[in-house]
C-alpha cells in the first residue's frame, strides 16, 4: 500500500503531458527573461567601458527603478491572477476588461512616479549615498530612464496580461526585438559612429527608453489585432470598472508591498555595502548582474505555475493546479542547480567579462560561489510563491518576505558584514540564510492547501 502511494507520487512529477504543458509556458518566459536581464547587462557592460563610477551610477538607478517596479508588480500579479482565472472560466470579455483597468491604473501610477523622478532626481540619488563622482553618471541616466517610466510599466503589465491568458511567446518575441534595438543603440549612442561622437551614459539611458517604447507599441498592436485570447479595442471609450479594478488591486497590493519590502531592504543593506567601499559596491553590482541569470528558470516556471494554477482553479480543478505547481518547481530546481554548478566552477571566467580590477574580481568570484549553493531554495521562494499568487494568496508571501528580508537579511547582513567584519561576503551569507528559511516556509504553506478555496470576486 505504501509502495503504491509512493509510485503514484512519483507519477505526478513524471507526467509527460503535464511536463509538456509546463514547458510550453515556461520556456518562452525563460528566454524572455534571459533577454530582459541581458538588456540590463548591456547597460552595465557598456557603462563599464566608460569607468567603474558609471557602473555604480547605473547600479544606483536600478536600485531605485526596482522600487518603482514594485508598484507595477502589484498591478501585474493582480492582472495575471484575474485574467488566468477568467480564461479558465471561459469569460474572455471580463479577462480583456481586466487588462484595460490594469492599463489605466498603470498610466496613473507612472505619471506620479515620472513627476517625482523629474523634480527630486538629485535628492533621491544623494539619499542613497551617491558621491559627486558617481552622481555625474547616475543623475542623467536616472532622469532619462525613470521619468518616462510609463513605457516600462506598460511593457510589464501587457506582458503579464498575455501570460495570464497563456500566451508566453509574444512577450518573448517582443523582448528579443527590444534587446536587439537596445544593443544597437547602446553602442551608437554611447560611443558614437562616424561624425557622431556619442553621448556617453546619456546614450545608454536613451537606448533603454527607446527600446521600451517600441516594445509597448508591439504589445499593444498584438492585443489590438486580437490575435491572442485577449482583445483590446483602443477606439472605444475606456471607463473605470470599480469592481474589476478592486479585484486586480486587492490581489496585487500584497504582492506590490512584498516587492517594496524587498526593495527597501535592498536599499538598507545597499547602504551598508556602500560604506564598505567602492570596490565592494561595484563587485556587488557585477555579481548581482551575473546572479540575475541564475533565477531565470524560476521566473519562467513561476509564470507557468501562476497561470496554470489560476486556469485550473477557474475550471474547478484544484488538484490539477497543485500538480502543475509542483511539477513547475521540480523542473525549475533541476535547471537552477545546473546553473549553480556552472557558477561555482566558472566564477573566475564570469568575473573577467567585466572591466574591473583584481580586488573586485576576487570578491565577485566569492559571491558567485555562495550564490551557487542556495539555488534549490531560491526556486521555492519564486516558483511556489508564484503559484500562491496565481491562486490569489498574495498575503502570505508578503509576510514571509517581511520576516526574511528585515528579520534575517538586513539584521544578519549588518552583523556578518560590520560586526564580524566579513564585508561583502557577510551580506551574501545573510542573503542565503534568508532565502533558505523563506523557501521552506513557503513550501509548507503551499502543501497545507488553503489557497485552493480563495475567491477573487
Image (spheres, rainbow, N blue to C red):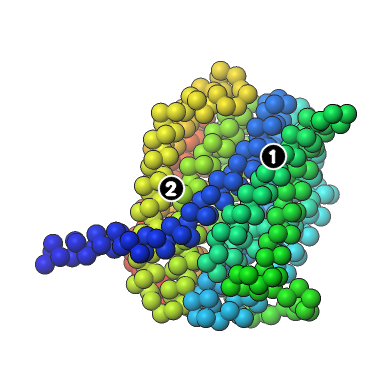
Lateral position of residue 392 relative to residue 440, left or right: right
Disc nearer the start of the sequence (2/1):
1
Q: Tell me the residue at 61%/54% (across/down).
A: 173
Q: Position of residue 128 (x, y in %)?
A: 69, 39
Q: Position of residue 122 (x, y in %)?
A: 80, 41
Q: Is residue 378 left or right of residue 203?
A: left
Q: Residue furthest top?
A: 358
Is residue 425 positioned above or below 322 on the image? above
- Residue 340 horizontal/vertical position (percent): 41, 38
Farthest residue toward the left?
1
Q: Which residue occupies the extreme right position in the image?
A: 195
Query: Is residue 46 among what the camera can see?
Result: yes
Q: Nearer the viewer, mark 2 or mark 1?
A: 1
Circle 1 residue: 183
Horizontal relation, residue 115 to residue 396: left or right: right
Query: Around disc 2, counting alpha carbons within 10 Å, would you say few (fewer than 14), some (14 to 19), or many (20 or more)?
Result: many
Q: Nearer the viewer, residue 221 or 385?
A: 221
Disc 1 secondary structure class: helix
The residue labelled by disc 2 is 378
Q: Is residue 121 visible?
A: no
- Whole-number angstrom distance, CA of label 2 to CA of label 1: 30 Å
Q: Give the quadrant of residue 356.
A: top right
Between residue 123 and residue 61, name the one nearer to us.
Answer: 61
Q: Which image quarter holds the C terminus?
A: bottom right
Question: Which residue is depicted at the point 70% across and 55% down?
Answer: 215
Horizontal arrangement in the rendering, residue 266 relative to residue 413 (left or right): right
Q: Residue at x 79, y 36 (%)?
A: 189
Residue 295 drawn at (x, y percent): 48, 46
Residue at (65, 32) in percent of width and height: 45
Q: Quadrant of the N terminus?
A: bottom left
Asked whether disc 2 touches disc 1, contact meaning CB atoms under 8 Å apart, the reply is no
Amino acid at each position: 500500500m505504501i509502495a503504491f502511494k509512493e509510485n503514484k507520487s512519483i507519477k505526478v512529477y513524471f507526467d509527460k503531458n503535464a511536463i509538456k504543458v509546463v514547458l510550453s509556458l515556461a520556456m518562452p518566459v525563460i528566454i524572455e527573461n534571459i533577454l530582459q536581464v541581458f538588456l540590463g547587462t548591456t547597460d552595465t557592460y557598456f557603462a563599464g567601458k566608460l569607468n567603474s563610477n558609471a557602473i555604480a551610477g547605473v547600479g544606483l538607478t536600478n536600485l531605485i527603478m526596482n522600487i518603482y517596479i514594485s508598484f507595477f508588480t502589484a498591478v501585474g500579479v493582480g492582472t495575471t491572477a484575474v485574467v488566468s482565472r477568467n480564461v479558465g472560466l471561459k469569460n474572455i470579455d471580463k479577462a480583456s476588461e481586466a487588462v484595460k483597468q490594469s492599463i489605466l491604473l498603470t498610466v496613473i501610477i507612472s505619471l506620479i512616479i515620472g513627476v517625482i523622478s523629474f523634480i527630486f532626481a538629485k535628492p533621491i540619488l544623494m539619499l542613497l549615498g551617491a558621491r559627486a563622482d558617481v552622481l555625474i553618471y547616475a543623475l542623467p541616466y536616472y532622469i532619462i530612464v525613470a521619468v518616462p517610466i510609463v513605457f516600462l510599466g506598460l511593457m510589464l503589465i501587457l506582458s503579464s496580461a498575455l501570460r495570464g491568458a497563456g500566451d508566453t511567446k509574444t512577450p518573448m518575441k517582443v523582448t528579443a526585438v527590444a534587446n536587439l534595438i537596445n544593443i544597437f543603440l547602446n553602442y551608437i549612442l554611447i560611443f558614437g559612429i562616424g561624425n557622431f561622437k556619442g553621448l556617453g551614459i546619456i546614450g545608454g539611458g536613451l537606448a533603454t527608453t527607446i527600446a521600451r517604447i517600441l516594445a509597448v507599441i508591439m504589445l499593444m498592436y498584438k492585443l489590438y489585432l486580437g490575435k491572442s485570447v485577449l482583445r483590446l479595442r483602443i477606439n472605444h471609450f475606456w471607463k473605470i470598472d470599480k469592481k474589476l479594478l478592486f479585484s486586480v488591486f486587492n490581489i496585487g497590493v500584497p504582492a506590490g508591498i512584498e516587492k517594496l519590502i524587498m526593495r527597501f531592504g535592498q536599499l538598507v543593506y545597499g547602504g551598508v555595502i556602500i560604506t564598505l567601499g567602492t570596490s565592494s559596491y561595484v563587485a556587488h553590482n557585477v555579481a548581482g548582474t551575473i546572479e540575475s541569470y541564475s533565477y531565470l528558470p524560476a521566473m519562467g516556471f513561476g509564470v507557468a505555475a501562476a497561470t496554470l494554477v489560476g486556469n485550473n482553479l477557474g475550471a474547478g480543478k484544484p488538484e490539477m493546479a497543485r500538480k502543475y505547481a509542483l511539477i513547475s518547481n521540480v523542473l525549475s530546481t533541476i535547471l537552477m542547480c545546473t546553473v549553480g554548478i556552472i557558477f561555482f566552477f566558472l566564477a573566475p571566467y564570469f568575473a573577467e567579462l567585466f572591466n574591473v580590477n583584481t580586488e573586485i574580481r576576487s570578491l565577485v568570484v566569492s559571491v558567485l560561489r555562495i550564490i551557487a549553493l542556495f539555488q534549490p531554495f531560491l526556486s521555492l521562494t519564486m516558483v511556489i510563491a508564484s503559484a500562491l499568487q496565481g491562486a490569489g494568496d498574495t498575503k502570505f508571501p508578503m509576510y514571509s518576505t517581511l520576516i526574511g528580508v528585515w528579520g534575517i537579511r538586513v539584521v544578519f547582513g549588518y552583523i556578518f558584514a560590520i560586526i564580524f567584519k566579513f564585508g561583502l561576503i557577510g551580506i551574501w551569507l545573510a542573503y542565503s540564510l534568508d532565502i533558505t528559511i523563506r523557501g521552506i516556509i513557503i513550501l509548507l504553506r503551499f502543501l497545507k492547501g488553503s489557497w485552493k478555496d480563495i475567491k477573487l470576486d
